[in-house]
Amino acid sequence: MANIVIVGAQWGDEGKGKIIDILAEDADYIVRFQGGNNAGHTVVVGKKKFIFHLIPSGVLHKGKICVIGNGVVINPKAILDEIKMAKSKGIMVGKNLVISDEAHVIFPYHQMLDSLRETKKSKIGTTKRGIGPCYADKVSRCGIRVQELFDKNTLREKLKANIEEKNKVFWALYKFKGFSFNKIYNEYLKFGKQIKKYAANTPLLLNKAIRDKKRILFEGAQGALLDIDHGTYPYVTSSNATAGGACTGSGVGPNKIDKIIGVLKAYTTRVGEGPFPTQFECELMEIIRNKGKEYGATTGRPRRCGWFDAVIGRYSVMVNGIDEIVVTKLDVLDDLEKIKICVGYRHKGKLYKEFPTEMNIVENCKPVYEVCDGWQDDTTAVGSFSKLPRNAKRYIGRLEELLGVRVSMVSTGSKRKQLIKV
């Protein structure tokens, strides 16, 4: 194993947590490089289910260093609660967790602004965790970083200026009184004392590890179609969820990345608002949602489900530079007699085989489908690709043809052993 980036190649929720958990066995460092506690990676080990929102999934393996990179935005209470949860389940969290001292910090005013915007203005479908407003402060150069939680004078100065400004905005736009400086200041000083032992210069740490021939696994959150630049804007997340974000969000140069793996479901889902050309009708939606347990790991929201969309798949391969793909949840399609694959969009008489960047086209297009024969056989206990039903193998082969990259693994369930190497 070399230095590998794993990214979601749809709208997130592709099952990356399981794949990261498995590949982490061969890695020395596992690095989360973007997003915040708006993400949720689910890993099933035996009869135990773990959901991680900030800590990299590799924490389940002994002897691995888990890094939260500078590109992540951190809610101190959330990370401390997650550490506590992990320890309560017998997972060691200590020197194996490193948090970038350059990562930006989420404050209560970020969460409130997120919530007010979502309810009072145009609905995007955010988790209301304050992720977007925190990134906005980062870009506006008024954000507060982890390292500043350790310096009470710097924290006082920056926090006081931010709260004064935010409170004026809250009252003027939303008639919300705002926040008390003293309460937040004292609370976050305490958070800083608890987090300090985990904080470090992570770009220095990771580049030294690369020089020492250590193997690094970069763990993406969300998915390519939620990327702030390349996703279905404005219905996107607020960070770069594509593979390029691994470099900016960790401080590791692109020439140090050896392979990029994209993870896609055998069908498509998205949570929240935004265009979704291949969305099922209600009856099939309920069947697939229930069989696939398609409810958000972070919010519990029901996910919208649809047929596999090769148009967004090819686009993801392109913008991420994906070398190989992992197909997850093949088993969810086991009972279907016929399975559709979207191979293009039709809009106002024009056929689009490549993903259009004009959102009005994506919102109003009609999907063009190929219809495949289903296999109507249980795949959850199949241990090798050769033993998959013939039509299941044909389906995987067709996805390879349409996406232009090879499928390296197929997942047929949530357990570690339910993974077929191709």
Image (cartoon, helix red, strand yellow):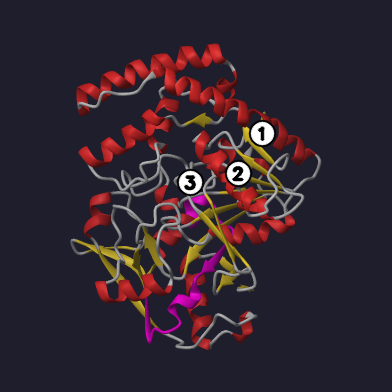
Q: Residue at x 37, y 73 (%)?
A: 288
Q: Are marks 1 and 3 in contact (CB under 8 Å)?
A: no
3 and 2 marks in contact (CB < 8 Å): no
Query: What distance separates the C-alpha of mark 1 from that of mark 2?
Result: 11 Å
**Quadrant in the picture for residue 19:** bottom right
Residue 322 image point, x, y percent = 55, 56
Query: Is disc 3 surrounded by few (<14), some (14 to 19) or many (20+) residues within 10 Å?
Result: many
Q: Is residue 168 left or right of residue 410?
A: left
Q: Which mark is residue 198?
A: 1
Q: CA distance from mark 1 to mark 3?
A: 24 Å
Residue type (three-letter) at the residue carrying disc 3: Ala
Image location of residue 47, percent across then percent down: 60, 69
Name the quadrant of the N terminus: bottom right
Residue 210 in the magenta stretch? The answer is no
Q: Residue furthest right?
A: 212
Q: Nearer the viewer, mark 3 or mark 2?
A: 2
Per the rendered image, the range of residues in magenta is 317-340
Q: Residue at x 74, y 57 (%)?
A: 26
Give how far apart the Cα atoms at labels 3 and 2 are: 24 Å
Residue 389 showing in the rendered view: yes
Q: Is residue 79 above or below residue 219?
A: above
Drawn side of residue 333 relative to residue 369, left or right? right
The tag earlier along the polypeptide, 1 or 2, is 2
Q: Which mark is residue 241?
A: 3
Q: Tell me the residue that label 2 is attached to.
A: 83
Residue 121 at least partly seen: no
